[in-house]
Image: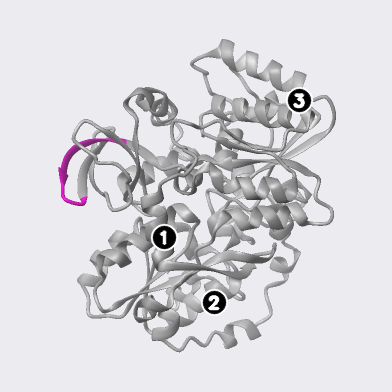
Amino acid sequence: MCLGVPGLVVEVEELTALVDFWGAKRRVRLDLVDEPVAPGDYVLNHVGFAIRRIPPEDVQTTLELYEQLMQEANARDLMTADVRGEIAGTSK
Amino acid sequence: MTGGRLEFRDARRAAALRDALARATTRPTAVMHVCGSHEQAIAKFGLRSAFPEQLDVIMGPGCPVCITDPPEIDEAIALAQQGVRILTYGDMVRVPGSAGSLADAQARGAKVETVYSVAQAVERAHGTKDEVVFFATGFETTAVATAAVLLAGVPPNLSVLSAHKYIPPVMEIVAEMPDCRIEGFLAAGHAATITGWGIFDAFVTRHGLPVVVAGFEPLDILAALVRLVDMIRRGERAVANMFPRCVTRDGNTHAQRQLWQVFRPIGGQWRGIAHVPNGNLRLRDEWAHVDARRRFTIDASSLRQTAPPVLARQCICGNIMAGVASPDACPLFGTACIPESPVGACMVSSEGTCRIWHEYGRVPRLAAV
C-alpha cells in the first residue's frame, strides 16, 4: 500500500531497527533510508522498510492522520485496515 | 457506508480550504490523482462533498494490484502449477488473470502464500528447500524494497518474478489519451518521497499540465487541490510540492540508486489501460540468476486459451483506471461485482477505485466541515 506507517525507533542494530507502532514493536530494515537513524527518531515504514526519517518538527503533523485512523471503531474500514495490517505486518 | 465521520482537528482551516477551492474553480475542471491511498482518504473523509460541483477529481491508474496485467498473473499461476512456491502481497492472490486467479490455483493444490514484506519472503525461503518465487508487484515504494533485499543477498532457492510498475511514465500515457480532459495531476506523496518532485519537471514541460505533490491528510489533499486548480486557472505550468515534510526535489537518492542498480525500465502493458513505455520494471541482466523468468521456463499459453468468463468481458476496470469512466457507469458494480466475489481487479484491492467506492459510497456526507 502507498500510505505506509510512521513509528518510533526504539533501538538500532546495523541495518535493522526495532520500531514501536502504537505499542506494536516490529523489526524494520534501514537499507533504504537516506539518513542516519537513531533511537527516538520517527521513520516512515513501507512494507517493512524505512523510506524516510521524519524530521522532528514534522512528527506531530505526520502522526495526526494515523491517530485518527487508530481510533476508527469500524474494523472493516478500508483505510484503517490497511494501516493496521501494515502495523501488524500481516498480509491483507 | 462509513465515510464522512472525520472531525477535522482544524475545522476552521478545512472550511477556509473548501471556500478557497470553490473560489478557484471558476469553470468545469477535471484533475487526476494516481494513488489508492488518496482515493481512500477522499472517500473515507467525504472530501468529494466539499468539492465544488464543477471540479471532478478522478482516480487514475493508482492501484498497483489493479494495473498488474493478466498475463503477468498467468506467469505466477503457471509457476505455481509447476510446483514452485509463490509468495506475494495479499491482494494479488485474488486478482483475476486471463482465466482465474492465484487463489484458484491454490484451491487446486498449488503452493501460494501471502507475505507482508519481501523481507518475509527471504525468511520463508531460508526455511524451506522448495524453489520459492516472490511475485513482486507494486510501484516504486515496493520496488525499492525488492531491490534492497536482492542487493543484501537472498538464498539460492529464491527468485523474483517482477511485475513492478513505475508511475511517472503512465501519467504521460493518460495525458496523451485523445479524449483526455485532465488538466492537472496530484502526485502521490510517498512515491514522490522516493523519486523526488523534480522528476515531474520533464512531464510538465512535455505536456503543459501542472503537477502538485500531495500528502494524505484530508487537509493536505484539500490544500493541494486548491493549489492545483489555482495553477490551472492561472495557466501556471510547474510542479508544486505541497508535501514538503516528506518530499524533496531530489527524493531519496539512496533508495533510487538501489532501485536502478537492480531494475531497468521497459515498456509493457498495464491492465486495461495501454502499453506504457518504460512503465514496467524488470531485473537487469546482472540479476539474471535471481530472475524467475530466466530460471524457469514459464508456459502460460494454456491459461490464455481459456476464454475469460462472460462477466469479466463486461468489466470496465480499464476505463475506470484510465479515468474515462467511474464505477457507477459499470453495470456490474455493486451487483454482480462485490468485494466478496469480485469480477474485476478494481473491486479486489483495498486500493481499487471500485472497492473504495463500494465501501464508502461515492459522495459520503462530510459531517464535520
Magenta segment range?
Answer: A7-15
Q: Residue at x 74, y 49 (%)?
A: B207
Quick check: marks 1 and 2 in contact, CB under 8 Å? no
Mark 2 is surrounded, within 10 Å at the Cα level, by few (under 14), some (14 to 19) or many (20 or more) other residues, namely many
Question: Relative to the observer, which residue lies in front, B264 or B182?
Answer: B264
Using the image as rendered, state which of residue B180 and residue A1 is in the foreground.
Answer: B180
The answer to whether residue A35 of the structure is visible from this angle is yes
Please report, as a chain letter, where disc 3 is located.
Answer: B
Residue B317 is situated, as x and y percent measured from the top left of the image, at: 69, 58
Quadrant location, the N terminus of chain B? top right
The reply to whether label 2 and label 3 mark residues of one chain is yes
Identify the element where label 2 is drawn: helix
- Residue under numbered circle 2: B74
Residue B52 marker: 3
- The residue at the point 33 percent across, 45 percent down is A34
Q: Earlier in the sequence, mark 2 or mark 3?
A: 3
Residue holding disc 1? B259
Task: Pick whichever of labels 1 and 3 is earlier in the sequence.
Answer: 3
Q: Residue at x 35, y 23 (%)?
A: A57
Write down the quadrant of residue B204 in the picture: top right
Query: Chain under label 2?
Result: B
Q: CA distance from mark 1 to mark 3?
A: 40 Å
- Residue B357 left/right relative to A50: right
Q: Amino acid at mark 3?
A: Pro
Q: Is residue B1 visible?
A: no
